[in-house]
């Protein structure tokens, strides 16, 4: 092995400058060149015990694909990644690698980890640009499996089972596949053309797609079994927005982040009037919440022409749950942060929002989760003048499937209960994974769950093949 490059920092990722990108929907990070990818790849020490792989929910053979990149064998790197990961161009862009593979990388002990996500993105983009062939699925085994939901959990489960020769039908409520990848994460972080291309490769494995089918309404889970499906995987996500339940939430100009981002991403409101779906964004916008969804909504509002966008969050900077990279990008683009602040009431005139009354908060004693709870600071009311309010304080699972599937055990908050090793639910033949099981989480955890369920379904159904 050639001597490793011991630079303590990653090869920098080229990016659009903040003042330019804040006014367009093009991708912020523009990706490594082949030379940059090869240079970054030489930072990997090829550790024998591979701690990075233990941190990857879909077991990508990280050191092996990085070694191929370092040697300039990009095609082989792509092939190795695709053996385990059906959606690498997506993961390379949006996975919180700092908490997964890169969080375990030995190089992070002294300096920055190897840029595993950036390298995965490079290899995936290379494979797509070159139109590299995909692995052929095994011959059909005559067994039918139904997958509910076309987000990362459902797509992964469907792709893995199709590769094994199952006849998979995926039912999606919307007209487009991808779940949050299509309707939630904005174009400037995850270009939709690329998502469609990567999903298309899963579909071409032989997965039948039924769009605009709401399972629980158009057909129930029990009826799927009557139609001859041997197993059903539920990956219906957590797309039901939560509200603050304060006065004024029904004024015009108040959106849930879910509705706002769906209109902009899936219905391409940013192309209005070319697109028929407008979004009204005023000059002054507040986004309530501190997660990835809040950062995405704030940065989208800026790109739609807002002059002043403020994140209102009830805890402090250290407690913001969004990825550090997203917070950094938002700060660079000029998003304001009104931290330790909580909305009390949305104000309006003639049916339209005009402002928000808030109160300052202080951090009190840690709660059951160990996080310090925010408490109201006496005599600290203040008001923001606003034209638009976007609420991004979390989402939960839609109740439809649990209401229409007798025997399916769920938590009090609505998530489906599963056996962790197999993603089996309390109802025989039904498996579940992704946000519908964990609550709002991450793309890679949803994919890991889809993969686990596919393996368990295969084990169960192959006994009868
Ligand atoms: P989803 O992606 O929600 O997909 C579920 C699918 O099921 C949807 O297509 C839905 O239409 C369909 N469906 C629902 N009910 C039915 C039904 N009854 N019948 C048929 N179909 C149904 N994660 C990251 O890792 N990195 C990020 O940067 C990141 N950013 C995010 C930004 C935003 C704005 C949001 C909202 C989330 C973000 N996440 C991020 C979280 C991540 O996207 C989710 O954890 C992930 O998409 C969950 O995947 P899933 O397949 O479980 O559900
Ligand atoms: Fe390479 Fe880091 Fe994985 Fe070691 S832990 S093999 S240095 S990526």
Image (spheres, rainbow, N blue to C red):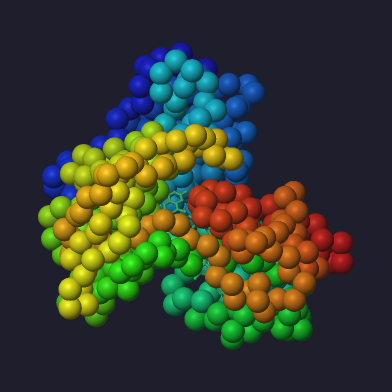
Q: Is residue 445 among the parts visible in the rendering?
A: yes
Residue drawn 74% across and 49% down? 421
Q: Is residue 261 above or below residue 106?
A: below
User: Residue 405: horizontal and vertical position, in percent?
Assistant: 70, 76
- Relative horizontal placement of residue 122, taking residue 12 as reference (left or right): right
x and y percent of residue 254 in the render? 29, 68
Q: Vertically, is 143 above or below 120? A: below
305 or 231, which is in the foreground?
305
| Figure quadrant of residue 123 | top left
Please give the name of the residue rendered at 52% of the width and 62% of the height, measured from the top-left corner. Answer: 396
Image height of 142 relative to 415, above or below: below
Position of 208 with respect to 328 (left or right) is right
State the residue lying farthest toward the right: 464
Locate residue 439 relative to residue 247 in the image: left or right. Answer: right
Q: Residue furthest bottom?
A: 218
| Residue 31 visible to an observer of this rendering | no
Residue nearer the viewer, 338 or 205: 338
Task: Name the spot of residue 34 as percent of width and height, x first.
Answer: 34, 36
- Name the residue rendered at 84%, 66% in the picture: 465
Residue 318 higher or lower than 25, as above or below = above
> Count the marks: how many?
0
174, 43: nearer the viewer: 174
Q: Position of residue 410 (x, y in %)?
A: 69, 64
Please report the residue visible at 54 percent of the width from the left and 28 percent of the height from the top.
104
């Amino acid at each position: 092995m050639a001597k490793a490059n011991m630079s303590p920092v990653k090869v920098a990722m080229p990016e659009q400058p903040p003042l330019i990108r804040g006014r367009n929907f093009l991708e912020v990070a523009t990706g490594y060149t082949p030379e940059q990818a090869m240079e970054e790849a030489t930072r990997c020490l090829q550790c024998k015990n591979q701690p990075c792989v233990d941190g990857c929910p879909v077991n990508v053979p990280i050191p092996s694909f990085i070694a191929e990149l370092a040697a300039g064998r990009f095609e082989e790197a792509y092939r190795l990644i695709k053996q385990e990961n059906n959606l690498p161009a997506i993961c390379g862009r949006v996975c919180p690698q700092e908490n997964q593979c890169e969080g375990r990388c030995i190089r992070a002990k002294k300096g920055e980890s190897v840029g595993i996500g950036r390298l995965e993105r490079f290899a995936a983009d290379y494979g797509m640009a070159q139109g590299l062939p995909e692995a052929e699925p095994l011959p059909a085994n005559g067994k039918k499996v139904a997958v509910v939901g076309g987000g990362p959990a459902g797509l992964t489960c469907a792709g893995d089972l199709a590769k094994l020769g199952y006849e998979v039908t995926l039912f999606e409520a919307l007209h487009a596949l991808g779940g949050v990848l299509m309707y939630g994460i904005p174009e400037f972080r995850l270009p939709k053309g690329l998502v469609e291309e990567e999903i298309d490769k899963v579909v071409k494995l032989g997965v039948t797609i039924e769009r605009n089918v709401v399972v629980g309404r158009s057909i129930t889970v029990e009826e799927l079994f009557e139609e001859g499906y041997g197993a059903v995987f539920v990956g219906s996500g957590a797309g039901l927005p939560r509200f603050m339940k304060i006065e004024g939430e029904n004024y015009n100009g108040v959106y849930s982040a879910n509705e706002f981002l769906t209109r902009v991403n899936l219905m391409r409101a940013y192309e209005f009037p070319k697109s028929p779906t407008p979004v009204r964004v005023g000059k002054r916008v507040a986004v309530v919440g501190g997660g990835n969804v809040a950062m995405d909504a704030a940065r989208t509002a800026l790109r739609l022409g807002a002059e002043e966008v403020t994140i209102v969050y009830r805890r402090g900077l250290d407690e913001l749950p969004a990825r550090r990279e997203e917070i950094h990008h938002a700060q660079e683009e000029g998003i304001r942060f009104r931290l330790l602040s909580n909305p009390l009431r949305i104000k309006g005139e003639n049916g339209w929002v005009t402002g928000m009354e808030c109160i300052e908060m202080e951090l009190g004693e840690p709660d059951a989760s160990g996080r310090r709870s925010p408490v109201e600071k006496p005599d600290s009311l203040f008001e923001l003048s606003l034209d638009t309010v976007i609420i991004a304080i979390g989402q939960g699972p839609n109740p439809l499937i649990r209401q229409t599937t007798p025997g399916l055990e769920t938590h009090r908050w609505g998530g489906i209960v599963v056996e962790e090793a197999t993603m089996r639910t309390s109802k025989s033949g039904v498996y579940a994974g992704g946000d519908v099981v964990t609550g709002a989480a991450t793309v890679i955890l949803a994919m890991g769950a889809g993969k686990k369920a596919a393996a368990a379904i295969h084990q169960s159904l192959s006994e009868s093949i």
